[in-house]
Amino acid sequence: MTILDFLMRDEGFAVLTAGSGEEGLRLMERERVDLVILDINLPGIDGLEVCHRIKTTAQIPVIFLSARDRDSDVISGLETGADDYMRKPFNHRELILRIGKLLKLAGGSTEGQTAIRTGKLLINRERETVFFDSREIKLTPMEYNLLAVLGSRLDWVISWQVLLKEAWGYEDWEGGREIVKVNIRRLRIKIEPDPSEPIYLLTERGRGYKLACVR
C-alpha cells in the first residue's frame, strides 16, 4: 500500500489502484469510479493519454499529482482535460480539500432557477444544462460552473480571481490563473462557432473574462 493509498483510506475513501495506465483504464471499465488521481509518468501509456481517454468517455474528475512541476507540465495536464494539477511534494490536507471540492462540483447543484440566454446560447440553471442552437452541449462540472458564474453577470468583466472563488470556492489556488484560462479555452471550443474568433466568451486583457450579450 502506498502512502497515498493509506491517506485516502484513512479519510474514508474506497481506493482502487492500478500499476499502469492500461490497467487503470481496464479497471474503470469494471468498477464505478468517482474520481481519478493520475501521475504523468506511468508505465505503458502516460498519464496525459490516460486522462484524454477518460475524458472522451466519461465526465469523471481527474487530478494530476506529479513531480513534473514546470508550468508547461501543468498546462499540458489541464489542456488534456484534467480538472486540477498538484505538484509533488504535496500537502495531504490540501489534496483532500481539493478532492472534496471536485466531488461536490461533480455531484452538486448550482443555485438559482433562471434560464440565461445570449444569442443562440442557453444556460438552464434549474437543470444545469447548456444548449447552443437547440443542441445540448456536454460540459464538465467545472466548465458548467464557470459558465454559470459568467452568465449570472452577463456582459460584466469578471477577474480570474473572482471566477476562481465563485466557480471553485477557492480564495487562492496554486495555478488558479491557468485553471481558469484553460477552462475558458475548453468552453470556447464547445460553444463558439469559431473558437479562434470568439463572440460569446471574451477576454478583456488585464481585467478578466465576460460572457457577452449577443443578439
Image (cartoon, rainbow, N blue to C red):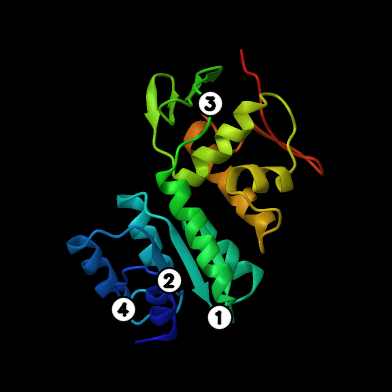
Instruction: Say above or below: 143 vs 176.
Output: above
Q: At x 39% / y 37%, what residue is drawn?
A: 138
Q: Earlier in the sequence, mark 3 or mark 1?
A: 1
Task: Using the image as rendered, state which of residue 58 and residue 94 is in the foreground.
Answer: 94
Between the residue at mark 3 and the residue at mark 4, the CA separation in whole angstroms equals 42 Å
The local crowd at label 4, few if under 14, some if 14 to 19, many if 20 or more residues have their Cα within 10 Å, is some
Marked residue nearer the N-terminal end (2 or 3): 2
Q: Quadrant of residue 97?
A: bottom right
Real-space Cα distance between discs 2 and 3?
A: 32 Å
Image quarter in which the N terminus is found: bottom left
- Label 2 neighbour load within 10 Å: few <14, some 14-19, many 20+: few
In the rendering, which numbered label is found on residue 11? Answer: 2
**10 relative to 164 in the view: left or right:** left
Instruction: Tell me the crowding category of disc 3: few under 14, some 14 to 19, or many 20 or more residues within 10 angstroms, Cα based.
Output: few
Sequence-earlier tag: 3 or 4:
4
Instruction: Please tell me whether residue 102 is drawn above or below residue 209 in the rendered image.
Output: below
Q: Amino acid at mark 4?
A: Ser
Measure the C-alpha gap from mark 3 to mark 1: 40 Å
Rendering coords of residue 88 (x, y %): 57, 79
Q: What residue sits right under mark 1 in the picture?
A: 67
Mark number displayed over residue 112: 3
- Amino acid identity at mark 1: Ala
Residue 20 bears which disc, if any?
Answer: 4
Residue 152 image offset from top left, x and y in percent: 62, 27
